[in-house]
Amino acid sequence: MEVEIGLGRKARRAYGLDEIALVPAPVAVDPEEVDVSLTIGNLTLSIPVLASAMDAAVDTRVAVEMSRLGGLAVLNLEGLHVRYEDPSPIIERIVSAPKEQAVQVLQEAYREPIKTDLIKERVREVKRVGARLGVAATPAKAMELLPIALEEGADVAVIQSTVTTVRFLSSNKPALPWERLRKAISVPLIVGNCVTYEAAWELMEVGADAVLVGVGPGAACTTRQVVGVGVPQATAIADVAAARDEFYRRTGKYVAVIADGGMRTGADICKAIACGADGVMIGSPIASALEAPGRGYHWGMATPHPGLPRGTRIFVGQVAPLKVLLLGPATKDDGTLNLVGALKNGMGMCGARTIKEMHRCQIVLAPTINTEGKRLQREQGVGQGR
């Protein structure tokens, strides 16, 4: 429903994950019997979690561990790990810089050229131990970099930018040759990001096996402040999921919807799935793992942009091993540990045995869901009051 914001100008109301709540079903399901698997093309993951292609979150070590735990890590083919043979000193410089200088230090670090030999070596490091790996490039670099990684055995290709559309108008920059690209990529293809029915539909038409949803919700992203562009995640996911469902009805191809960004707790993931996502891509929670390369810090991948940075460096801490973050057991009460366990419990309460059944969960608007009855927690700084 649209509302008038001024003479001749209307706007649609959109909702974030913090504004909704899920309604428990009249019949509950044993969480131990819930299936949370995610299928992307011909690849099935036992947990519906992808680690973002962000340099503070994913290196080859994290990729191997994510694969072992049943998920998928995505390595940034334009990041520090393929610019420097040993990125450790560079990362140390980034995390130790005063916050006023962090963006400048990041910009300087990313001026180092990408090295194709390092792309090959990073993929080999993961594949030689039999682990799965996704690799990501921006649309401008996709045709150049993705084939290098795929030739070495990368399992999933990701084309990702702040906003990715099939149609691109420019007088001096070519549009991505989607048909040729799709024919050249034999592995599952994930494309994003998008937040609308129309953009998602067109990405599905050109052969995406999954689409990423989210513009600006990430913890380290400043896109919404810098350019004012973005749609709150609950609405964005629901709109893209509607495109997926209609596309499946018309073509018989099911394209996975992956919510990307803005999810910190198990509750956030439960809500994203209920809104229509088949899986999630998370960055800052992964960056807080003990194995993560960022040493307790995280930064958006548009932060080092030479002309218009759209991200920042944030401190996320070194919270727990990746296994505990994803699978538990949790030792904190704030929902930031055992994310998959929280998803299974939430699905059980909502009577959902599968991800697709969770899409039918009843949702209510609940702006006070995080504050109702929590006065003492807020006053004491515990639980939901942190």
Image (cartoon, grey):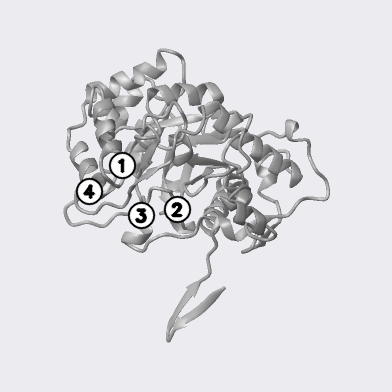
Q: Which mark is residue 91?
A: none
Disc 4 or 1, which lies upstream in sequence?
1
Question: Please, which residue is most extreme toward the front here?
Answer: 380
Disc 3 or 1, which lies upstream in sequence?
1
Mark 3, Cα crowd under 10 Å, few <14 / some 14-19 / many 20+, is: many
Residue 327 percent coordinates (x, y): 60, 30
Horizontal side of residue 376 vs 174, given as left or right: right
Q: What residue does disc 2 label?
A: 217
Say which of marks 2 and 4 sits in front: 2
Mark 2 belongs to which amino acid? Pro
Q: Who is closer to the viewer here, 339 or 89?
A: 89
Q: Which mark is residue 174?
A: 4
Disc 1 or 2, which lies upstream in sequence?
1
Residue 333 percent coordinates (x, y): 63, 41
Mark 1 belongs to which amino acid? Thr
- At x 28%, y 47%, the residue is 99
